[in-house]
Amino acid sequence: MFNIILFGPPGSGKGTQSEKLIAKYGFKHISTGDLLRSEIAGKTELGLKAKAFMDEGKLVPDEVVIGMVDNVIVNNPAVYGFLFDGFPRTKAQAEALDALLRKHEENINLMLALDVPEEELIVRMINRAKTSGRTDDADSEVQKRRIGVYKNETLAVASYYDQFGKVTTVNGLGSVDDIFSALSTEIDNHYS
């Protein structure tokens, strides 16, 4: 298997690029945001708890997220690889993910980090709120908290994987197709 993390701040285009990479390479997509939104839509106990954290711009507790990820891995033993989108979000989650993957005799092969200026991130999230129905994108205070959480907690994930030589930064500005081409080139260079 070839497992990658698509990494970047909220609004950097991870979801858009994930869809294109999945279509091209056949990765199994693991987006904890999608998993959590599904739980919220189902009004499960987990979903209601997660919604309270997300609406405040906070992270959902690690044990909940890791358990969901483990279920996806266990239920998809024959995929080409996993594409982690928006996860891990903390160094502790990265360490837990690595331990989980080792349990399944796998590892992260590559982290692709999308680099986008903060001003552009806010514009993208406001636009996304208009079309996606994501209430967490419409509130500028929530956006600022999410970007703050990214800088203070999530950015450490890139440092963690960088120590293993697994991080490649990709310019997240430009057309969707240009960014996709740059990401594909990096995957091809690391997989071949």
Image (cartoon, rainbow, N blue to C red):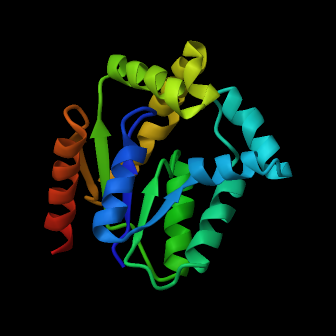
Residue in the picture at 33% in, 73% down? 2
- Above-or-below relation of 92 to 118: below
Looking at the image, residue 155 sits to the left or right of residue 34; the answer is left
Tell me if I can see residue 118 in this picture: yes
Q: Where the C terminus falls, by quadrant?
A: bottom left
| Residue 85 x/y as whole percent | 45, 52
- Report the front residue among 176 and 146: 176
Q: Is residue 62 visible?
A: no
Q: Please determine whether, in this image, residue 165 is positioned above or below residue 118.
A: below
- The image quadrant of residue 172 is top left
Q: Residue furthest right?
A: 45
Above or below residue 1? Residue 44 is above
Please determine whether, in this image, residue 128 is positioned above or below residue 4: above
The image position of residue 6, as x and y in percent, is: 37, 51
The residue positioned 63% from the left and 54% from the top of the image is 35
Q: Is residue 36 left or right of residue 27?
A: right
Q: Looking at the image, which residue is at 69% across and 26% down?
A: 56
Image side of residue 127 versus residue 188, left or right = right
